[in-house]
Image (tube, grey):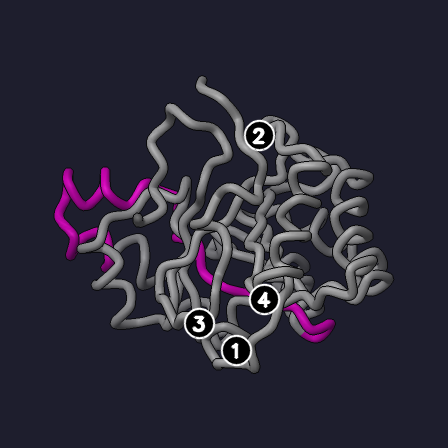
Amino acid sequence: MGCQHDTSAIDGAFYNWDGRKVHCAIDLDTYARNDLASVEAGLDRVLETGEVLELYAHDPGRTVEWSALEAVLAATTARNLPFYTYADFAHGVPPGPGVALSFDDAYIDDWLSGSDLYLRYGARLTFFVAYYQGLRPAQKEALHELEREGHAIEAHGVAHLRAPLIAEQKGLGAYMADEALPSITRLRDDGYEVTTFAYPYGARTSEIDRALLEHVSLVRSVSFTWSGVADPCPR
């Protein structure tokens, strides 16, 4: 792996309110080794530029320590920065500096256990849900509870597959029909708006972007703080 850069140097993870449809976020999980000082450099950048820093993680308490997550929330509120959801971007809320923090996959129980922490810091988050068809009824109710608390519930694929690989092997139509669209429609059938689709692993192509954007307002990929690795965020 190559050199690591501060979050503030990763332009793709900053939304400058230009109306773009393909967003990218930076990983907060422990294995990404993106420490608090790096995140704070990104927060200081948005104070100067009016952008939004996009961050994501997976399973609080496991892939990212609760203490590390709370440090990011505290650093955000200490700078009087608001939290945006991807639904906010889709709806065109008034622009301003802030943070968009999301969680991916299906760690519903752990996500819900952080409700008091999110409330303490006034954090509104986006939860990108995969494997929705396999969730227990109690987990589906937990997602509704998170939505009632002001968070956004969005789509992340039926089986968390790499979009370009499936499109190459089976065709774009098969990817959309089997993996992407059911992830969107099942959530909508259960009452969620679904404005955004997050690519598993951030893996995307422009062709898949165009196909998805016929069904949602935005798609989300990822950016890396490490040089020397292929970055799926569009240039």
Determine which of the numbered discs, if any, sits on residue 32 in the image.
2
Label 1 crowd (10 A; few <14 / some 14-19 / many >=20): few
Q: Secondary structure at mark 4?
A: loop
The residue where tag 1 is placed is 191
First in residue order: circle 3 vs circle 2: 2
- The answer to which of marks 2 and 1 sits earlier in the sequence is 2
CA distance separating discs 2 and 1 = 34 Å
Highlighted range, magenta: 148-177
Residue 116's image quarter? bottom right
Residue 39 percent location from the top left of the image: 66, 43
Name the residue rendered at 62%, 66% in the picture: 97
Mark 4, Cα crowd under 10 Å, few <14 / some 14-19 / many 20+, is some
Instruction: Determine the residue located farthest toward the top in the rendered image.
Output: 1
Say which of marks 4 and 2 sits in front.
Answer: 4
What number of labels is visible?
4
Write down the residue under mark 4.
Answer: 50
Tag 1 secondary structure: loop
Instruction: Kindly identify which numbered label has been placed on residue 195.
Output: 3
| Amino acid type at mark 3 | Thr
Q: Amino acid at mark 2?
A: Ala
Quadrant that contains the N terminus: top left
Mark 4 / mark 2, whichever is N-terminal: 2
Measure the alpha-carbon separation of dots 3 and 2: 27 Å
User: Residue 121 appears in which quarter of the rendering?
Assistant: bottom right
Q: Residue 63's x, y, as percent? A: 65, 34
Give whichever of 105, 10 is nearer the camera: 10
Point 38% across, 60% down: residue: 219
Question: Circle 2 — which element?
Answer: helix
